Amino acid sequence: MLTDKERKAEILRILREKKEVTVKELSHIFGVSAMTIYRDIRELEREGEVKRKHGSVILNTVENKETIPIKSCPICEKPITRSHPYKIIVEGSKIVEACCEHCGLMLHRNYAEKNVSALTYDFITEKPINALDAYYVVGSSAVPCCSPSVIPFINKDDAEKFSKGFGGKVLNFIDAYNEIINRMNINIKSCCSPQQPVSFVLKDLNKKDKE
Ligand SMILES: [Zn+2]
Ligand SMILES: [Zn+2]
């Protein structure tokens, strides 16, 4: 049985040979679950080694790189490197992006009084999903970006499967939001964003209050 580190090195070696490989093939090669491979790939993606393309994985080489100007996350100021960052659409027009779901949830606090919708991407399929309807695994051992990590799933079963393997709690949007805000308030007393009430409910997100 390989360690996580050995498996990731091996994935990179395979990619240098084959150029492109699917999650299914990798899970077969290593005899581990697809969830484990998804976690490895996310970590390699964060390290800038690989990127995902239509269900398979390729090396993040110069010729595979897209030339998109790099924005930085409004919460943690890290460059936004994910191809599908967390998006908040404010009052139907302005889009703000965060490096990951962790910062995305933190960012909602800045717009708690506005009418917003939000978009995230399923951890498994990378399909866009309504962030307010997603399930999140909060605080697992997989940390693709900021900690405590927040990993989105369209499907509650997948979220539960994931948390069985890697720990963390399965929460809906509001509970995940409150969990992150509470944990960050405990961790960093002098947080950069202005203090707002810790709990708010979904209807507040959608209320059309233009006072
Ligand atoms: Zn961030
Ligand atoms: Zn992040």
Image (spheres, grey):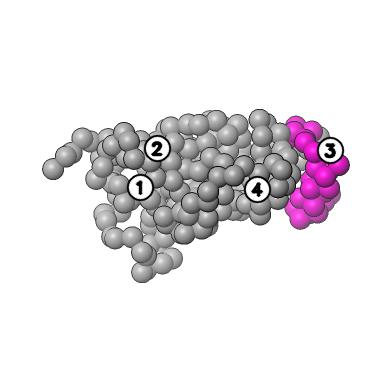
Q: What distance separates the C-alpha of mark 1 from that of mark 2?
A: 9 Å
Q: What distance separates the C-alpha of mark 3 from that of mark 1?
A: 41 Å
Judge by depth and name the residue closer to the eye, 2 or 53.
53
Q: Position of residue 68 (x, y in %)?
A: 55, 45
- At label 3, the amino acid type is Lys
Element on which disc 2 rests: strand
Circle 1 residues within 10 Å: few <14, some 14–19, many ≥20: many
Q: Which mark is residue 18?
A: 3
Q: Earlier in the sequence, mark 4 or mark 1?
A: 4
Q: Residue at x 38, y 41 (%)?
A: 95
CB contact under 8 Å: marks 3 and 1: no
Quarter that holds the C terminus: top left
Q: Earlier in the sequence, mark 4 or mark 2?
A: 4
Element on which disc 3 rests: helix
Does residue 183 appear left or right of residue 197 in this picture?
right
Q: What distance separates the C-alpha of mark 4 from that of mark 3?
A: 18 Å
Q: Residue at x 28, y 37 (%)?
A: 91
Q: Position of residue 112 (x, y in %)?
A: 28, 46
Residue behind mark 4: 45
Q: Which residues, given as a range, are shown in magenta? A: 1-25
Q: Is residue 14 magenta?
A: yes
Q: Quadrant of residue 39?
A: top right
Q: Residue at x 65, y 48 (%)?
A: 45
Most common secondary structure along the magenta stretch: helix
Residue behind mark 1: 108
- Of circles 3 and 1, the one toward us is 3
CB contact under 8 Å: marks 1 and 2: yes
